[in-house]
Image (tube, rainbow, N blue to C red):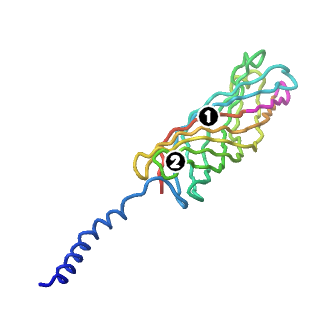
Amino acid sequence: MSIKTLAVGAACAGMTFAAPALAQTDATPRQGIAAGDVLLRVRTILVAPNETSGSILPAFPGERVRVNDSVMPEIDVTYMATDHIGFELIAATTKHHADGRTGTTGKIGKLASTWVLPPTLTAQYHLNPTGKVRPYVGAGLNYTIFWNEKAADGLVTAVGRTGVHMKDSFGWAAQVGVDVDITPKVFLNLDVKYIDIDTTARLRTTAAGTQRVAISLDPLVFGVGLGLRL
């Protein structure tokens, strides 16, 4: 057997053994994110309003309201337009109630409740897209819808049947967060948002006429959950 024949045989054998190894390398899931990826996250969020309230006018000047925190599930989707830039849309709805703080309305306590739906679109910059730990920052726009507004029983008892309406809000949003890989496709997510929300609540009462109060909610939204790279 010639040296040439041995060399050709060794080369063929090498290629035979190398082929499975190359196929295994190609099949190995890649780390991080890249352009074209879709990221699906499911979080538990705490919505904590930093409310600033005007007076309840015209009947209760100087009396203001406070708004409670709320915990609910949330889902969001991010599309990576480039390796670094993604666009996130969140969907969640939370229930809140407004309480009187002082004077007559303070004695009544809970005045009204509402569900809040704040769809928010942010553009994100991901600082370390190929890493296992991927911090990001974002900014965008928010449109908040108030729905299923209801007067509290205590308010109805005090002033009779009451209709409640809260004006929808358009504002800006900012966020900071981090994704931490658990597997090549599943990751832990921590996220904090600030959402600019301003509304006016209108209370049409039987005994006290129509009352209005301007409220800047401006909540911080703290989220923790899991994500999946689709």
Magenta segment: 206-216
Which numbered circle lies on residue 212?
A: none
Q: Main secondary structure of the magenta part?
A: strand
Disc 2, SS: strand
Q: How far is disc 2 from disc 1 in space, using C-alphas?
A: 17 Å
Disc 1, SS: strand
Total count of labels: 2
Residue 44 in percent (x, y) is at: 52, 38
Q: Residue furthest left?
A: 1
State the residue position of label 1. Answer: 47
* Residue located at (67% from left, 43% from top): 118
Q: State which quadrant residue 61 falls in.
A: top right
* Residue located at (43% from left, 49% from top): 186
State the residue position of label 2. Answer: 41
Residue 91 in percent (x, y) is at: 60, 47
72 w.r.t. 26: above or below: above
Residue in the foreground of this view, choosing between 163 and 6: 6
Residue 184 in percent (x, y) is at: 41, 52
Which of disc 1 and disc 2 is earlier in sequence?
Answer: 2
Task: Check contact, mark 2 vs mark 1: CB within 8 A.
Answer: no
Determine crowd level at label 1: few under 14, some 14-19, many 20+ residues with C-alpha closer than 10 A.
Answer: many
* Residue located at (62% from left, 49% from top): 124
Q: State which quadrant residue 221 falls in.
A: top right
Residue 183 in percent (x, y) is at: 40, 49
Q: Is residue 54 left or right of residue 128?
A: right
Question: Quick one: quadrant of the N terminus?
Answer: bottom left
Q: State which quadrant residue 63 falls in.
A: top right
Residue type marked 1: Val
Q: Residue furthest front?
A: 3
181 magenta-colored: no
